Image (cartoon, grey):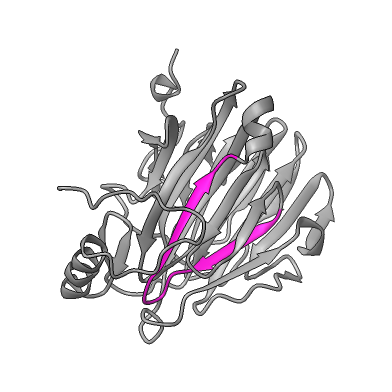
């Protein structure tokens, strides 16, 4: 049975705690399938998060791997967060960074950046398993045209909260008494939760918008049961308890919404005209190149 054929979540749209459950759609990313959750027809953003993909789990045999050629971004920050495997990041600022499990890699596009995501030569020879989450956060007004930047924080430098069968790694923002060392320009919450069977945790209060994505296991938010690969959007102003019926992994996302944003391909902006300019700039070769990587993804026709 395909993951797309999984049973429906056991909660209705009338739930006060979880008024909306989003199921992913299949997308191809550089030769392997991902689960795309955001943007969705039901909901475009949760806080600043305007894009949410679960990559894998996928097993690459020797000779195969990730091969995403250089491509541009504007108006957003990206976070690639891995559970298993490794991706080699290169960008037009000159950064070459292996992305490994548990580390945070925050790339801010601002007025424009180009990057590639590939499997390093050694792992191409041996093969690997790959599983992780890739997200985009729309930049707020006043920061959309900021200078591009890249920030890497190893896994052992991220704060961890542990109690009663719960391990919470705070990737961005502040939760459960822990604060990430990475500070995006908009109020943002991003947490990796690992829960033992029977563990219970009160979700953070005071977050403008909040959602929980179940990577594996089975959890309930209030009376709403969420199966793997579903995202439950928490009701405004509510902070229900999350309970794990089995060993589970859950990603919490949320924060302050940035206002209306347009998305076309890899471009995010409050202005349609700015996106048209970015399209023209990429087609004309006016974006900076990635040193050592001469390939590129052409501008899509539609």
* 148 with respect to 74 (left or right): right
Left or right: 281 in relation to 126: left
Q: Quadrant of residue 94?
A: bottom right
Whether the magenta-drawn stretch holds residue 104 is answered as yes
Q: Residue at x 58, y 30 (%)?
A: 57
Residue, x 66% and y 65% (percent of image)? 152
The quadrant where residue 220 appears: top right
Q: Position of residue 119 (x, y in %)?
A: 58, 39
Task: State the residue lying farthest toward the top.
Answer: 1
Residue 203 visible in the picture: no
Residue that appears at 44% across and 44% down? 68
Image quarter of the N terminus? top left
Is residue 228 or residue 156 the one in the foreground? 156
- Decide if residue 28 is in sight here: yes
- Residue 82's place in the image compared with 112, above or below, is above
Image point (54%, 26%), residue name: 64
24 vs 108, nearest the viewer: 108
Please state the horizontal and vertical placement of residue 133, each as a whole percent of the image. Answer: 55, 46
Q: Which portion, as a residue range, is magenta?
A: 103-119
Task: Residue 95: give x, y in percent of width and height.
Answer: 59, 64
> How would you classify the magenta stretch by its main secondary structure?
strand
Residue 98 shown in magenta? no
């Amino acid at each position: 049975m395909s993951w797309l054929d999984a049973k429906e979540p056991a909660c209705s749209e009338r739930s006060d705690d979880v008024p909306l459950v989003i199921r992913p759609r299949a997308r191809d990313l550089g030769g392997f399938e991902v689960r795309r959750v955001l943007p969705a027809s039901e909901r475009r953003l949760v806080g600043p998060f305007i894009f949410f993909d679960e990559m894998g789990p996928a097993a690459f045999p020797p000779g195969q791997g990730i091969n995403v050629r250089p491509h541009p971004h504007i108006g957003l920050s990206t976070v690639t967060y891995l559970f298993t495997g490794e991706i080699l990041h290169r960008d037009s600022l000159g950064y070459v960074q292996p992305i490994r499990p548990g580390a945070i890699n925050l790339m801010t596009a601002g007025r424009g950046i180009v990057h590639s995501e590939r499997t390093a030569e050694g792992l191409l020879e041996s093969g690997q398993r790959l599983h992780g989450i890739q997200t985009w956060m729309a930049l707020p007004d006043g920061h959309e045209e900021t200078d591009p930047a890249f920030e890497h924080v190893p896994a052992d430098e991220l704060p961890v909260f542990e109690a009663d069968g719960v391990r919470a790694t705070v990737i961005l923002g502040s939760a459960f008494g822990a604060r990430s060392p990475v500070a995006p320009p908009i109020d943002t919450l991003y947490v990796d939760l690992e829960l033992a069977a029977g563990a219970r945790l009160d979700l953070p209060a005071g977050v403008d918008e909040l959602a929980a994505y179940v990577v594996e296991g089975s959890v309930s938010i209030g009376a709403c049961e969420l199966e793997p690969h579903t995202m439950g959007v928490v009701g405004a102003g509510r902070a229900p308890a999350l309970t794990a019926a089995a060993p589970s992994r859950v990603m919490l996302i949320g924060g302050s919404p940035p206002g209306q944003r347009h998305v076309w391909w890899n471009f995010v902006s409050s202005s349609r005209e700015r996106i048209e300019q970015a399209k023209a700039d990429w087609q004309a070769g006016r974006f900076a190149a990635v040193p050592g990587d001469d390939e590129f993804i052409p501008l899509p026709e539609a």
